[in-house]
Image: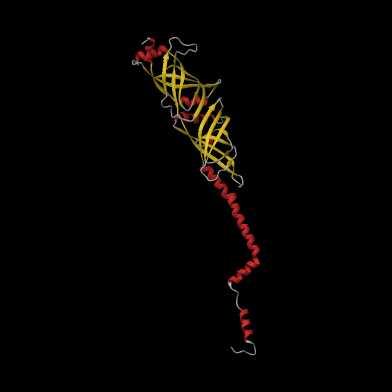
Amino acid sequence: MEEEKGVPQSHVQEIRHEGQKPGFGAKLKAHYKKWWWLHLIFFIASTLIIVLCLVYVAFPRISQDGVNNSKLEIESLILTNPTANSFHLEQTSLLTNHNKYHPRLDAFNASLSVGGATDKIFAYVKLPAVHATEHATTHIDQDVQITNMDAFVDYNTQLWNHDSVDLALKGRTKLHEMRFPVTTVDFHKTIRLKGFNGLPGFNVTSFEIKLIPEPDGANMIGMVYIPNPSVLTLTMGNVTFNNYVGDDVIGTTLLSDLVIKPGNNTLPMRSTVNQTLVIEKVTSTYKDGMLPVDIVCNTSIYNGQHLEYFEKALQSNRQHVVLNVGAALAALGGG
């Protein structure tokens, strides 16, 4: 190319090269070279926000979900030393946790109620600290104060009359997992307890009539069968029952120092009956000697104290048996 106006061609090419705009890569490189510190701060801040969200938002939610998905079952419940307003509780429970996390839970106070209603809370218990492995056993051994008698009566009434009762346990505790911050979780569990279901199978398995009453006045001695399909052991004291034939009271029965244990319970009974009235009914109305008797709880007394929660529950659970009085009288030579 020819030189123009005395300017060398090489100078013209150099001028044209310097006038070109830099490309995107060059601009990006220049930007990061100048503002690298600002991008570093942004990266650190973003990472910190993500970590904090995981630690303080996601982890508590994960922890609560893990507690919610765990299962609590009562394997044994023993009620002893009852008073009018309290009892001693020994309870063994199994906590099942299939989550991959196995945290530790602090001890905490929990309310007990029927179905979870606030106005149905009848007591508070202290649950011990537990390491929530896949299968963890917990034990309670403490005196319990009854805080709502009506609710506790309702709980016992449902136990005696239904196949099952939903016992709600609610509280809050601290959860510890590895190096994560300690978090607070709600521990709400509904435990389905097997009930007595109205005592199907209840029966007087044997009895004999005494013409001469024993020193305590008992003139009918026998054995009574009480099935218990639940995991409950109940100390109920001296329990008395009124015995009816139709609308007529024919006597009373005492189950002394009554303790109902899981399984089959065959227990001694002592009754004081109006023998004259019984013989009258057998000879007039029930000539086959088979006497239909309704049994209704009267009192439940332990160490001189009435146990209202047992009395009212049992009073709602009227039992019916048929006694072969004719055979018992025949054994005496009286029939």
Q: Left of 225 or right of it: where is 5?
A: right
Q: Position of residue 43 (x, y in %)?
A: 61, 59
Image height check: is 269 above or below 68?
A: above
Image height check: is 156 above or below 26?
A: above
Residue at the left extreme of this rendering: 288
Q: Position of residue 127 (x, y in %)?
A: 57, 35
Q: Quadrant of the C terminus?
A: top left
Q: Position of residue 112 (x, y in %)?
A: 54, 34
Q: Quadrant of the N terminus?
A: bottom right
Q: Left of 147 or right of it: where is 293?
A: left
Image height check: is 47 above or below 79?
A: below
**Hey, which quadrant is residue 286 in on the image?**
top left
**Hey, which quadrant is residue 176 in on the image?**
top right
Image height check: is 127 above or below 45?
A: above
Does the image show residue 281? no
Identify which residue, 16 or 302, lies in the foreground.
Answer: 16
**Residue lying at 61% horizontally and 71% vertically, measured from the top left:** 27
**Residue lying at 47% horizontally and 22% vertically, measured from the top left:** 297
